[in-house]
């Protein structure tokens, strides 16, 4: 089921970094996310609720700025 809050989710098991793109377009990278947390997030019936209860304020994060290429693709798309 599509989320009303989360647009896209990626995860690197090597670095344990999870990247989340919100429907607003803002993107964040979360550090040291265990694989089982990512798996549960990916299959949660409500990704927004799962994020609020299990991700937000529990993992260090940084915002990922949009690159010029991202901006150009967005304008062209």
Image: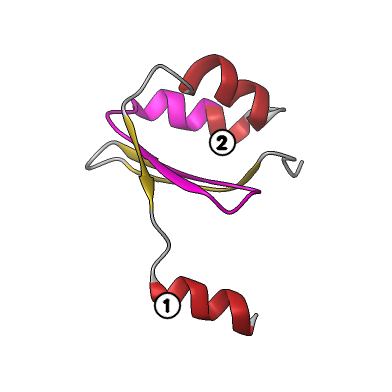
Q: Is 37 in the magenta? A: yes
Instruction: Say which mark, if any, is on residue 8.
Output: none
The magenta span reads 19-40
Residue 36 sits in which quadrant?
top left
What residue is at 38 percent from the left and 51 percent from the top? 64
Tag 1: Cα neighbours inside 10 Å, few (<14), some, or many (≥20)? few
Q: CA distance from mark 2 to mark 1?
A: 27 Å
Answer above or below: position of 16 versus 46.
below
Q: Which residue is mark 1?
A: 69
Q: Position of residue 18 (x, y in %)?
A: 39, 40
Question: Is 38 a magenta residue?
Answer: yes
**Which residue is identified by label 2?**
42
What colour scheme has been applied to the protein in the rendered image? Answer: secondary structure
Q: Earlier in the sequence, mark 2 or mark 1?
A: 2
Kindly report which numbered mark, 2 or 1, lies closer to the viewer in this rendering: 1
* Quadrant assignment, res 41: top right
Question: x, y (%) of residue 13?
Answer: 30, 40
Residue 31 position, x and y percent, is: 29, 32
Q: Residue at x 53, y 26 (%)?
A: 40
| Position above or below: 24 against 30 | below
Q: Nearer the viewer, residue 66 or 14?
A: 66
How would you rate the neighbour count of disc 2 (Cα within 10 Å): few for under 14, some for 14-19, many for 20 or more? some
* Figure check: 73 above or below 53: below
For the N terminus, give its image quadrant: top right
- Place of residue 4 in the rendered image (x, y in percent of width and height, measured from the top left): 75, 40
Q: Nearer the viewer, residue 42 or 17?
A: 17
Q: Secondary structure at mark 1?
A: helix
Tally of numbered tags? 2
């Amino acid at each position: 089921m599509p989320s009303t809050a989360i647009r896209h989710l990626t995860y690197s098991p090597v670095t344990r970094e999870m990247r989340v793109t919100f429907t607003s377009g803002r993107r964040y990278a979360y550090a040291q996310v265990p694989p089982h947390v990512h798996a549960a997030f990916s299959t949660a019936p409500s990704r927004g609720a799962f994020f609020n209860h299990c991700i937000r304020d529990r993992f260090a994060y940084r915002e990922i700025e949009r690159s010029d290429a991202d901006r150009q693709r967005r304008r062209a798309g």
